[in-house]
Amino acid sequence: MVMLFAGFAGMAFKSDTEVTLRPGQTTEVRSPYGHVYRFTHQGISQYEQLNRFVSAASLDVYQDGTYIGVMKSEKRQHMDSMGQPTFEPSTEVAIRSGIREDLYIIFAGAVQGTEEAVYRITINPLVWWVWYGGIVLALGGLISMWPTGRAPTPVKRRADQAGYVARVEA
């Protein structure tokens, strides 16, 4: 339970940033632990797959000046057999998970069909503690319910209660 509470307490330090970037533009976001993340927008690509149309946006990501990789978030519009959109578009979130914090990048969309992209960048500290706290809680529950291998202890029956017996005849 302590691990779960620690994880949920981390939500108080959550960082949320929304930015609009053109290709090559950069933005920086500071995490609650003091890390500085730098994001450089590479561009937007659009392509069709079997049952959907995908708009994907990519960012180069640096943590404290060290390159940590490319993160790609997508907007997916599913299509029916006639090529007509079904449902609302769905979003594939780019996630980088670590023991201290999780980094989420959401591609909110392109600005009027250009290469300019709107991103929502979220840094959630201590998410790892929630997941592992839940695992520890589940394992503890299984261990406490596990049979011991001994036969159950028989319950001692009490003698009949003391008192008077009255017989009623009709």
Image: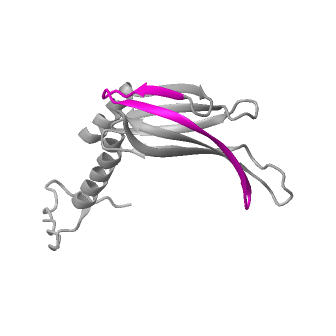
- For the image, the number of numbered tags is 0
Confirm whether the magenta stretch covers residue 40: yes
Where is residue 168? Give x, y as percent: 31, 58
- Report the side of 43 relative to 71 (left or right): right
Relative vertical location of residue 104 with respect to residue 146 in this rendering, above or below: above
- Report the side of 65 relative to 105 (left or right): left
Residue positioned 53% across, 39% down in the render: 59
Quick one: 14 or 130, which is closer to the camera? 14
Where is residue 138? Give x, y as percent: 31, 54
Quick one: 58 or 2, which is closer to the camera? 58
Relative vertical location of residue 56 with respect to residue 36 in this rendering, above or below: below
- Range drawn in magenta: 26-54
Where is residue 166? Give x, y as percent: 24, 57
Image quadrant of residue 81? bottom right
Where is residue 57? Give x, y as percent: 61, 42
Quick one: 157 or 96, which is closer to the camera? 96
